[in-house]
Structure formats: structure tokens, C-alpha cells
Amino acid sequence: MEVLFIIAAFLVGGLVTWIVMNTMLKTRTNNILKEAEAEAKVLRENKMLEVKEKYLTLKNEYEVQCNQRNAKMQQFESKLKQREMQLNQLQSEVQRGRSENETVKENLNNQLDIVNSRKQELEKLHRMANERLETISGLSAQEAKTSLIESLKEEAKTDAMSYVNEIMEEAKMTANKEAKRIVVQTIQRVATEAAIENSVTVFNIDSDEVKGRIIGREGRNIRALEAATGVEIIVDDTPEAIVLSAFDPVRREIARLALHQLVTDGRIHQARIEEVVAKVKKQVEDEIVETGKRTTIDLGIHGLHPDLIRLIGKMKYRSSYGQNLLQHARETANLCAIMASELGLNAKKAKRAGLLHDIGKVPDDEPELPHAILGMKLAEKYKEKPEICNAIGAHHDEIEMDSLLSPIVQACDAISGARPGARREIVEAYIKRLNDLEKLALSYPGVVKTYAIQAGRELRVIVGADKIDDKEIETLSYDIAKKIQDEMTYPGQVKITVIRETRAVSFAK
């Protein structure tokens, strides 16, 4: 019974507990639901506010965009209206122009009809006039045209030739005057000595007793001298003179100075000869360098390679056609500087090119090259500027000229060599040049005789009167001058005079 009672108590207690717990859970659930509903209401209200704000913002932006688009549409519509008005105006103008063109076209057609009718009348009159002229003159129209064309052609040719001659004469006068002014002014400002040298040097002695001492026992001294200097020593019957013969001027100078020291000292034997010759060689070499330095300083040329300076000094002992090479180079350098100044060019570069233009004549070795090309290669080797190298190589037309310095150096080289007394010309070369001049002119058809006069400075050409007329001699003179200029080498200039003569000879008996 008690057990039942306890069980019943437990059941009643559990039921009461479940009821209490259920009530509490319901209460809590209701509270949570109320709180959730309140929070949801608050969130919904906030979201509604945000949506309303975003709606208002988007609405405002849309209204702004719509206003802008409406404004653009209004502008576009106004532009379209203006364009439409312009098009209407243009259309009206085009229509008006079209009507005017139609009127003008009609007028032109009428005038064209009138012109065609008048042209037909004119052709008819021209044909009638030609027939009358053919009847009167006895010539056909083609023959008359040919005769007229020939007459006009001859007249035009004569007028053209005279006009060309006038222009050429005027150009020659102007050019010659200006060129002569520059050249004369240049030459007047430069003076030089004309030194004539050859392959023989005469060594003067006080008495003939010295000759025996120079010859030595069994000719040992003279053989030693010749071996040491490379110079042929000629001891003959000439009183108080010994001849030193060699093509190399430096060797002759060494031999002369060595002989002078030996004769002055009085001690002449083989060992002494070798010692003195070695000392004199060193002295001459130093003098060569000193001469080169002094020359460059005198001319105001700086920055030359030492080897080039030494080659310039060697020019002192070299001659060309009897003209001292160093004096020629100095003279050419000064002429180039003055002429370049007159023409507005760089005078220092011109002077440098003029001094170095014949450097290929005094090399240490003797290659088989023209001296202009050799000089250009030497200048390139010692880092001279390209325009100076070109001026050196082109002064005898060995290569093409590519700078204004080249013709200046060429002209100044010719001026220095062509002045009176500057050079001695070999007789054979002189005669050959005269013969070449005469043969060149004789090669032209119609030439009867030619005479080279005034040392080749003037060429007289006599033509046959029956072969060439007066109009053609101007052309012949020009052609001969151009051919001489292109094919021959000569100093100065050559004047070509073409002579045509007609003679009528009769005898009264």
C-alpha cells in the first residue's frame, strides 16, 4: 500500500512538475516571441526607411538625368531645326543656280553654234586664201611651210648662238674679274724665294792638297765616305772643288757637312769618317725635326703628329722641277689660307691641307703609289680630318673631290708652281705637251693647222673656210677648250683662238 502511495505521490509530483515546467516554458516562449516580434518590427521599420531613402535618391538622380537628356534633346532639336533651315536655304540656292546654269548653257550652245558657223566660214576663206597663195607663188602649202620653218630655224639658231655668246662673255668677264682679284690679291700677300736645286752639290776646298787627303791611301778614305753616306764623290781636275752626286738631297747634305768637319779637323781616316758621318746624321735628323717644328709654328698650325712634322722638315731637302718643296708647301699653305678667307671658309684647315698636300713626296719608304694618294694615306694614318685627307688625295685629280678645300688646294698648288721662275720644266716634257696640244686640236674635223705658242699658254687653230662656217667656230673653240681641260695637265690656263679666213685672189694682166 505504501508502495502504491509512493508511486502515486511520485506521479502526482511529476505531473505537477510537468505542469509548472510547461507553464514556465510557455511563458518564456511567449516572451521570446514578443521580443522577436518587436525586433522584427523595428528592423522592418528601419528597412522601410532605408528603402524610402534609396528610392528618393534614385528618384532624384533619375530626375536629374531626365532633365539633362531633355536639355540635350532640346539642343539637338534646335540644331536639327537650324540644319533643316540651312538645307532648305541651300536647296533653294542650288535650285536657283541650276536654273542659272541652264540659262548659261543655252547661251553657250547658241554662241557655240555661232562659233562653229564662223569657223566653217574662216576655214573656207583660209582655204581660198591658200589656193590663191599657191597659185601666185607657185609653191604648195607643205613646201611653203617647210621653207618658213627652215628660215625660222636658222634665224632662231643664230639668235640663240649670239645670246649664248653674250651670256658666256658676260659670265667670263664677271668670273675672270672676280677670280683674278682673289688670285692676284692672294699672290700679292705672299712672297717666297725661288730656290733652284739639282742632284749635284759642289764642295769647295782651300787647296788641291786636301783632295789627296780625302782620297786617302789607295782610295780608302773616299770609299769609306761613299759607303757611309751613300753619295758618289767625284774628285776630278776641277780646281778647289769636289762634286757630291746623289739623288737624295738629305744624303748630299750629310756628305757635305761630314766633309766640312773632316777637312776642318784635319783628321781623315776610316774610323774618324764613320764617327763623323754618324754624328752628322744625328745632327741632320735633329735639324729636320727642328725645321718641321719651326715651319708649323711660323704658319700657326698645331696638333700635328710628330712623324708628320719630321716629314715636313724633310721637304727642305727635296725639290720638284727645281722648286724647293718646303718653300712650295709654305707658299701653298699661305695661298690656301688667304683664298679660303676670301671665300668664307675655314682658313686654318685650308692652311693645314696646303702644307701637307705634297707630304707623299718625302716618305720614309718608296712605295709604287702616286704622291697624292700616298700623302692621303699618310694623313689618314696620323689621324688627320677626312676633308684634309681628301684635299691631299684630290689635288691631282687622283680621287673625287668631296669638300670645298680640295679645289682650293689644287688651285693654290697650280698658282705656286705656275708663277714665273718657280719651276724648271724638262725640255722633253715641255715639247711633248706642245705636241699633245696641237694633236688634240687637229683631231677635230675641219681643222687645217694648229700652232701652240707662248710656251703652251695659247693655241692657234686654223680651220678651212669651206668646211666650217662662222657660227660653228664658237662651238669648236669651246669643245677644244673643254677637251684640253678634261684630258691634259698644264700650269695656268690655255687660250684657244680659232681662225677662219676666206681669200679671193685674182691677177690683172
Image: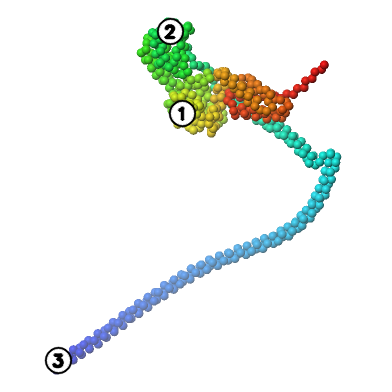
- For badge 3, the amino acid type reads Val
* Residue that appears at 75% across and 34% down: 155
Residue 76 visible in the displayed image = yes
Precedes in sequence: disc 3 or disc 2: 3
Circle 1 Cα neighbour tier, 10 Å, few/some/many (<14 / 14–19 / ≥20): many
Query: Of the residues tagged 1 and 3, which is closer to the observer?
Result: 1
* Residue that appears at 80% across and 49% down: 119
- For badge 2, the amino acid type reads Lys
On screen, residue 49 above or below 331: below
Q: Indicate the quadrant where residue 281 lies.
A: top left
Q: Which mark is residue 211?
A: 2
Q: Position of residue 458 (x, y in %)?
A: 64, 22
Q: Is residue 26 left or right of residue 500?
A: left
Precedes in sequence: disc 1 or disc 3: 3
* Residue that appears at 46% across and 71% down: 56
Q: Which residue is mark 1?
A: 378
On screen, residue 333 above or below 13: above
Q: Which residue is mark 3?
A: 3
Q: Indicate the quadrant where residue 268 lies.
A: top left
Query: Of the residues tagged 3 and 2, which is closer to the observer?
Result: 2
Q: Position of residue 486 (x, y in %)?
A: 60, 29
